[in-house]
Amino acid sequence: MTGPSLDATSERLLRELVPQVLGAVIRRFHDFAAAEDAVQEALVAAFTQWPQEGVPENPRGWLIQVASRRMLDYWRSEEARHNRETAVALEAQTLAPAADHELAMNQDDTLILFFMCCHPALTASSAVALTLRAVGGLTTAEIAHAFFVPEATMAQRISRAKQSIKTSGIPFSPPTPQEQTQRLRSVLHVLYLIFNEGYTSSSGPDLQRLELAHEAIRLARAVYASLSDDPEVTGLLALMLLTDARRVARTGAHGELIPLMEQDRSVWDQAEIAEGIELLTAALSKGRIGTYQLQAAIAAVHDEAPRPEDTDWPHILALYELLKRMSDNPMVTLNHAIAVAIVHGPRKGLELLQPLDDDARVAGQHRLPAVRAHLLEMAGDREAAIAQYRLAASRTTSIPERNYLMTQAAKLSEG
């Protein structure tokens, strides 16, 4: 017979606390891999003890205490424990008060962990992957999807990243102000990917993972609070707000996907749109245009159109032309093709998709056939569009996206 289990509220609390606890433990012990294992053991302890004993008054401090004890046990078992013993003993003497004190600190351990994961021993892609795993809570499969690589490849990359940090000799510790500046672009990229996964989940029964999107916005606000003069920091926060403003309108009563041009714009969050546009205006006034600002500008053009037919597509196309010059992201190419199709006709857009057939980053993904299907439908090529919709549906692991794509194919078949 199984014992009592955690309720949904307690499970959600644990998920929210994991990055904060991991950040605190890593800051103290400077060993990512061991700290991650210790935090996982603390979570197991919480799932075992909290249903029987109740959620502690200070759950964050409780988890830090348990994880830190696991770290002390790990250190003592290492061959080099004799060299570390004095430092460990001193740490143990102040362990309990430190955990309670850290709860009241204004420092955001999750944000600090972001910067720590962007370690100089790592390549940019490895740093992003490691941070998505440690802070964003994404699975290896979800991270692989974001990077357009197989899951096995991403698992190896994350494993190598942990090993690189361990063997580099560079402490895994909170960065200095200069190091924060050097790592900022990687941090922004991580926030961008976490928000995207929250806004459109790559797999599962739900279109959106709101906890991820909201956490990305919260952390983007924290970065902005410290670096409001950086136009790309401001641009990223603006992009998130202008995109998140449409969240409620993106799904129907049964969780089905509603595309942008069919959404009820009266339920878009006007407060988020106003804040996003204010931030974007401030960023653009700096005169240093970056990719996040351009994406935010595109989102703003959509958000400011009261009806789909009022959308200024020539303006959007011009912005995508600029963005393509600054970014080699295949998603930019796909969106640019859509804008070209609307402004200059679907055949022009379809021509722009052809090079992506040889691009390994998207050749096996569902987005390419989904966009091609949409443009073929615009061009009146019904049979080809049906085939592409079905191909896209077979490739996606998101149930709402799959249902939408199959519905589009069915509508064309009936017509």
Image: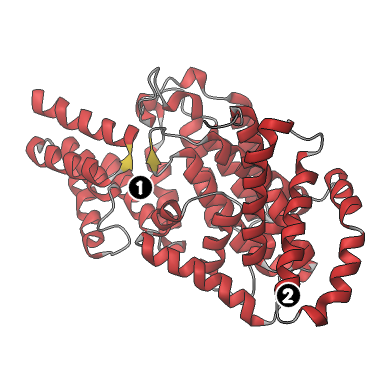
What SS does tag 2 mark? loop
Vertical side of 221 occupied by 269: above or below: above
Q: In this view of the protein, can residue 95 be seen by the observer?
A: yes
Q: In the rendered image, which quarter is residue 4 located in?
A: top right
Q: Residue at horizontal 59%, vertical 56%?
A: 134
Q: In the rendered image, which quarter is residue 79 located in?
A: bottom right
Vertical side of 306 occupied by 69: above or below: below
For disc 1, the neighbor class at 10 Å (few under 14, some 14 to 19, many from 20) is some
What SS does tag 1 mark? helix
Q: Residue at horizontal 66%, vertical 62%?
A: 184
Q: Residue at horizontal 32%, vertical 50%?
A: 334
Vertical side of 113 occupied by 406: above or below: above
Residue in the foreground of this view, choosing between 48 and 107: 48
From the viewer's perspective, tell me whether residue 304 is left or right of residue 206: right
Mark positioned earlier in the residue sequence (1 or 2): 2
Are the residues flagged by discs 1 and 2 in contact, CB closer than 8 Å? no
Residue 31 image point, x, y percent? 69, 69
| Circle 1: residue type | Asn
Separation (CA) of disc 1 from disc 2: 41 Å
Residue 196 image point, x, y percent? 49, 45
Residue placed under numbered mark 2 in the picture: 171
Residue 385 image point, x, y percent? 14, 39
Residue placed under numbered mark 1 in the picture: 335
Residue 174 image point, x, y percent? 76, 65
Q: In this view of the protein, can residue 105 be seen by the observer?
A: no
